[in-house]
Structures are given as structure tokens and as C-alpha cells.
Amino acid sequence: MSLERAIELACEKPMPRRTEHIPLDAAHNRILAVGLHSKVDDPRFDNSAMDGFAVRASDCDEAGARLHIVGTSKAGGQDLPTVEAGEACRIMTGARVPDGADAIVMVEDTEVLGESVSINGPARTNFIRRRAENLARGQEALPTGALLGPAELALAATMGHGEIEVAVKPRIAIISTGDELVRAGDELAEGQIYESNSHALASLVEEMGCEANRLDSAPDSLDELRKTLDSLTGHDAIITSGGVSMGDWDLVRRLMEEEGELVFWRMKVRPGGPPLFGTWKGTPLFGLPGNPVSSQVIFHILLAPWIQHSLGAHPELGPRLSRQVRVRLKNSVKGAEDKLCLRRIRITSEGDELVGSVHTHQGSGNLHSLVAHDGLTLLPPGTDAEAGDFVDALWLR
């Protein structure tokens, strides 16, 4: 089936959505469950954007005007003087603008002469930050589904929120399958290879705001695979890699067909055509291809949208692994008949446009190609692209 239809069907069986209240200090990389409204105006009062003097602009029309200094306004200060005609008040960045003043003169444009100040530069009304010019009390500034990074956390604090309601991180189990797989660092026997898919998939799961539980690889045994899946009670989803194609030892597909609830198998994409989706005893299960490039590509185009949907993520401010862009190709790339083709490219900027280039071969077992490139073409079925053509692409994080 098409990618769009696969996403639609998968989203009919989302992970359960739960929320919890946590302190702001623990909220990095969490997803807002309820939008945040400001408890205060920001700024709370008119304040200065510069160190200098708060003045009346009408007193500073002539260069060299001399004004009497009536006090100092510093951040957090109290009991400010009122600035009358012919007067000035020292002021620090962020400090409240005294009543009567309507402009700021930078300290560099002044000269203090005893209890007076000589104004040698312009008095600027735009150097006053006006009350509520950033946020008004009650305004929603962080919507439901926003991912909380450094800027969002600072904004939440500015709005007065010390505790927030976030989505509980779904717990996702990750299992690679195959007798040939060996844990990285162990000794290899003849015919064995190091298992790598689970490391990539766990990282992608974490980047999407979920908790990854990476298990040891499962052998090619129907009984052992069944036992492993049955042991995953309490997980919100399961991701397997390998065992989903058409061979005699593709046991994930066979087990899901015979004992699970299989929703779909195979998609019209390249690479990664044989993924499956269904549920195992009520738990959503994605079976990804064993080829390392294919498993990661399918995660980007299928699982990432499904996780976003499950978490109620904001479409722009929520967690995501890529964004769609338009690029001009520097190399020709071959498409695939009747399949969406996701060729790896490196995306860079040249002048006022983005360009995509190919730096390694495109084999689905070539993990280096995912390091050498940071984008995927979105070539429609049956479409080839020549050097110089503009195509849609996913720019990966």
C-alpha cells in the first residue's frame, strides 16, 4: 500500500496517551500535554533596553542639553523618582522606567558633570521595552504538543510556571531478530555479524520523546520469538527489525500472520518495502526490515508520524526527525516503478537555494550512506530525476 495509507491505518491504533505533572527542572525534551498561558505580562513593566539615562525626549532636542540627575533606577529597585522637566534618572538595562520619562539616552552619549548630565546623543523612545509587548497575561504562548527545549523552558519560567503537565513517555521495546546477530564488542564466529539496528532505532525512539527499551536480539525460533513478545507486557509498543520479508526464516511476519492481528504488510516505497504493522495481544507492533538503511528510513517516514499522532504532538512545534524541503539535485537519481523512492542525499545551501548531492552508493545495507547524507528524496513512483531538477526531499536532523 502507499505510505499515506499505511500512516492512516497505523494511526487508527495509537499508543495510549497519559499525562503527568512534573517540575520545570525535569521537563527538558518532554511534550506539553496542556498549553501554557502566561501568568504575568512580559515585560511586567516598562523597562530600559540600555544602560544610560531615562529622560523626557522634549528636554533633549538640542545637543549638549544639561539635565539634573534625580536618582538611579536599577533592576529590582524600589521607590523610583519621578522625572520632571529638566531632569534625568540613571537607569540600568532591565530596570523600570521612572514615571515622567519617555526616552532613554545611552550612557555612551552622555557626560556626567557633578549632579548634572550632558546629553550628547539622541533620546530614543524605542529603547524602552513596553509592558506586555512580548506577552499579555492570559495569552497562550506554548501550545499543546510543543516539545520543551531550552527556549521553551525559559519561556515557561518567564510565564510563571514552576510545574507543568506533560505527556508520559511511552515505553517502546526494540528487538532485532536473527541467528547471525552478535552484540557489538563480542567475538564473531564464522557467518556472524554485529547487531546495529536496535541502537539506531532506540536513538530515534528517544529523539521522538519516548523511552526505548533495547533488548538482546532474538534467535530464529518461532517459540523464542513468541516468548519474547509475550514478555513485553507493560510496553506501549514493540519495534522489531528483520524477519518480515518472504523467506522461510522471516518469522516475525509468520507469527503475526498466524497469531497476531496483522493490519498491513508491505508498502510501495524503496528502500524498505516489506514492513508490517499490527498488534500483538493488544500492543501495537511494527516489524521493520533487517537491512539497516531500510529500518531507519521506515522509522523516519512511518513511525515518526505515528508517534507524533500518539503523543498529540504539535505539527510544527512538536518532536520531529525531519522537515520537507525543495532541493536542486547535483546528481541524477533513479526512481522506482510504482514506488516512492527515498534516495539518500546530502543537503547544503548554495546561494538562495538548497542543493542535494550523492556521495556513496545507495545499497540498503550501506550504513555509511546514512552518515554521509542527511536527506531523503521523495521521488514519486515511476519518476527519475536528472542533475539540475528540483525535487521534494526530507531534510533529516
Image (spheres, rainbow, N blue to C red):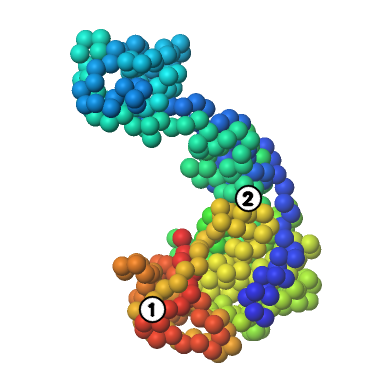
What label sits on residue 145 in the rendered view?
Answer: 2
In the picture shown, does residue 214 fall above or below 147?
below
Judged left or right of residue 59, residue 32 is right
The residue identified by callout 1 is: 329
- Please report the residue visible at 77 percent of the width from the left and 70 percent of the height from the top: 260
**Depth check, front residue: 290 or 130:** 130
Residue 52: where, in percent of width, then height?
30, 24
Quadrant in which the N terminus appears: bottom right
Q: Residues within 10 Å of mark 2 (few under 14, many from 20)?
A: many
Secondary structure of the residue carrying tag 1 is: strand
Q: Are marks 1 and 2 in contact (CB under 8 Å)?
A: no
Residue type at mark 1 is Leu
| Rendering quarter of residue 107 | top left
In the picture shown, does residue 200 fall above or below 40?
below
**Depth check, front residue: 125 or 23:** 125
Q: Residues within 10 Å of mark 1 (few under 14, many from 20)?
A: many
Residue 329: where, in percent of width, then height?
38, 78
Residue 311 seen:
yes
Residue type at mark 2 is Gly
**Depth check, front residue: 177 or 385:** 385
- Please report the residue visible at 55 percent of the width from the left and 67 percent of the height from the top: 300
Secondary structure of the residue carrying tag 2 is: loop
- Which one is earlier in the sequence, the residue at label 1 or at label 2? 2
Residue 221: where, in percent of width, then height?
68, 72
Residue 337: where, in percent of width, then height?
55, 90
